[in-house]
Image (spheres, helix red, strand yellow):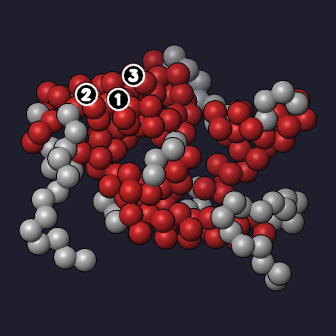
């Protein structure tokens, strides 16, 4: 597609960017780093303050810049927590995402099943390449394909294709487990 003669869409102000994407980035941090669930907003605020101090208008690719800085600041905070032993690192079975909680509200049996599903999902996600895993976390945090593509430095189409491939890979991993059968959303059921 030719873009000659077209100007890129105007960049939102930092305030508008924070308002439109702040909660999504916080959900991304909470999903990617469960130990920081209660501090995700603080990590996002720190990064947006850094963007202001660096000169928001001078940042060439803001979504990628924010994602990289979020990862750096989250890892810094995790190192700090480990150093002073403020928070013990959770076991994978203790991690619970908000979207799993929302799906299992009310019924205790569903809550137990939801926690087990989440543990399994986290275990399986570890088998995906880092960028595909981040793409899945961004999807779970509510980012659109276009936003995921911008954050990862991909086109919107590549973000969609990578998500589809991630889902297929997760379905294949699930099918290899004899003790667990579930259908991944967005993947056609195979007869094999």
Residue at x 87%, y 66% (from the top left corner): 178
- x and y percentages locating residue 62 in the rendered image: 24, 45
Q: How many badges with numbers are in the image?
A: 3
Q: Position of residue 180 (x, y in %)?
A: 85, 59
For residue 15, the mark is 2
User: How would you rate the neighbour count of disc 2 (Cα within 10 Å): few for under 14, some for 14-19, many for 20 or more?
Assistant: few
Which quadrant of the figure has residue 170? bottom right
Percent position of residue 87, x then y: 55, 20
- Can you say whether 18 is above or below 157 in the image? above
Residue receiving disc 3: 42
**Outermost residue toward the front in this view:** 5
Residue at horizontal 82 percent and vertical 83 percent from the top: 192
Q: Which residue is mark 1?
A: 19
Give yes or no for contact between labels 1 and 2 (Cβ–Cβ under 8 Å).
yes
Disc 2/disc 3 C-alpha distance (Å): 16 Å
Which residue does the image show at 28% across and 31% down from the upper left? 16
Q: Secondary structure at mark 2?
A: helix
- First-in-chain label (2 vs 3): 2
The answer to whether residue 29 is seen in the rendering is no
Q: Earlier in the sequence, mark 1 or mark 3?
A: 1
In this picture, residue 73 sits left or right of residue 174: left
Residue 89: x percent and y percent?
59, 30
Element marked by disc 3: helix
Is residue 132 shown to the viewer in this render?
yes
């Amino acid at each position: 597609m030719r873009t000659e003669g077209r100007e890129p869409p105007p960049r939102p102000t930092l305030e508008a960017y924070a308002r439109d994407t702040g909660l999504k980035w916080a959900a991304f941090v909470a999903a990617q780093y469960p130990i920081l669930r209660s501090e995700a907003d603080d990590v996002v605020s720190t990064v947006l303050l850094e963007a202001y101090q660096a000169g928001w208008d001078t940042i060439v690719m803001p979504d990628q810049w924010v994602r990289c800085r979020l990862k750096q600041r989250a890892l810094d905070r995790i190192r700090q927590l480990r150093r002073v032993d403020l928070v013990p690192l959770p076991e994978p079975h203790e991690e619970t995402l908000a979207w799993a909680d929302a799906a299992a509200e009310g019924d205790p049996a569903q809550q137990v099943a939801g926690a087990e599903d989440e543990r399994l999902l986290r275990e399986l996600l570890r088998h995906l390449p880092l960028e595909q895993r981040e793409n899945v976390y961004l999807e779970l945090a509510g980012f659109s394909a276009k936003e995921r593509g911008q954050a990862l430095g991909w086109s919107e189409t590549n973000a969609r294709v990578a998500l589809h491939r991630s889902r297929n890979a997760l379905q294949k991993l699930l099918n290899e487990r004899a003790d667990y059968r579930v259908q991944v959303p967005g993947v056609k059921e195979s007869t094999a």
